Amino acid sequence: MQPTRENAWETLTRYTQSESLLRHALAVEASTRFYARRLGEDEERWGVTALLHDFDYEIHPTLDQHPQEGAPILREEGYPEEVVEAVLSHAEHLDMPRDTPLKRTLFACDELSGFVHACGLVRPTGLEGLEPKSVKKKLKQPSFAAGVHRDEVYAGAELIGLALDEHIANVVAALQPISEQLGLRRGADAA
Ligand SMILES: [Fe+2]
Ligand SMILES: [Fe+2]
């Protein structure tokens, strides 16, 4: 099977109702696709993987199930092993090697996409004008978006060999075009 975005969206929405989880999937997809384009990789394949990385979280909300018990479902549906393995590798507790650019990028985009999204939600202009330095400042406030693992944000940037500022700027740029789907205000609406 050569999975398409449509396949992945169909699988994701069959198992996921929560709007915030769907928005998380879309945010990680946009960031991962950004890097696929930049690196000349298979954007569709990378996007599919990102859309699916938490597809089973609603049915498997604890780490003794997510994402490892989701993997057999993906295999059953015919997703290629490259996709299934990358999905598995995003989970820290499984301790799998992140030995492909797709695995590294997915890991690097997962927590940071959620964090940048959270930053955008509390700004009247959404992501417009959001600077890496203010994202970094918020990273240092443990109470803000407390669910985001800071250590994974820092480790992710390092894993893809980028300075944190650059990685943040890339993720902000990647999310801006889908602001509306993410429930973010746009600069123009706020004016
Ligand atoms: Fe996850
Ligand atoms: Fe995630």
Image (cartoon, helix red, strand yellow):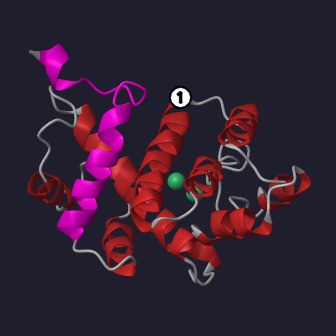
Q: Secondary structure at mark 1?
A: helix
Q: Residues within 10 Å of mark 1 (few under 14, many from 20)?
A: few
Left/right of residue 142 with respect to residue 155 in the rendered view: left
Left/right of residue 75 with respect to residue 135 in the rendered view: right
Q: Nearer the viewer, residue 190 or 177?
A: 177
Which quadrant is home to the C terminus?
A: top left
Residue 15: x and y in percent read 74, 37
What type of secondary structure mainly makes up the magenta span?
helix
Q: Is residue 64 at all visible to an observer of this figure?
A: no
For image coordinates 71% across by 44% down, the residue present is: 4
- In the image, the segment drawn in magenta is 164-190
For image coordinates 47% across by 65% down, the residue present is: 40
> Quick check: 83 above or below 172?
below
Residue 52: x and y in percent read 65, 50
Residue 73: x and y in percent read 85, 53
Task: Using the rendered view, name the quadrant where residue 82 is placed.
Answer: bottom right
Q: Does the magenta segment cover residue 128?
A: no
Q: Tell which residue pokes out farthest to the front in this image.
A: 40
Residue that numbered label 1 is attached to: 19
Left/right of residue 8 with respect to residue 185 in the rendered view: right
Q: Tell which residue pokes out farthest to the right in this image.
A: 76
> Quick check: 125 above or below 156?
above
Task: Using the rendered view, name the quadrant where residue 177 is placed.
Answer: top left
Which quadrant is home to the N terminus?
A: bottom right
For image coordinates 47% across by 67% down, the residue present is: 105
Count of marks, rendered view: 1
For image coordinates 63% across by 81% down, the residue present is: 96
Q: Does the magenta segment cover residue 171?
A: yes
Residue 119: x and y in percent read 23, 42
Tag 1: residue type?
A: Glu
> Quick check: 185 above or below 146?
above
Q: Nearer the viewer, residue 82 or 87?
A: 82
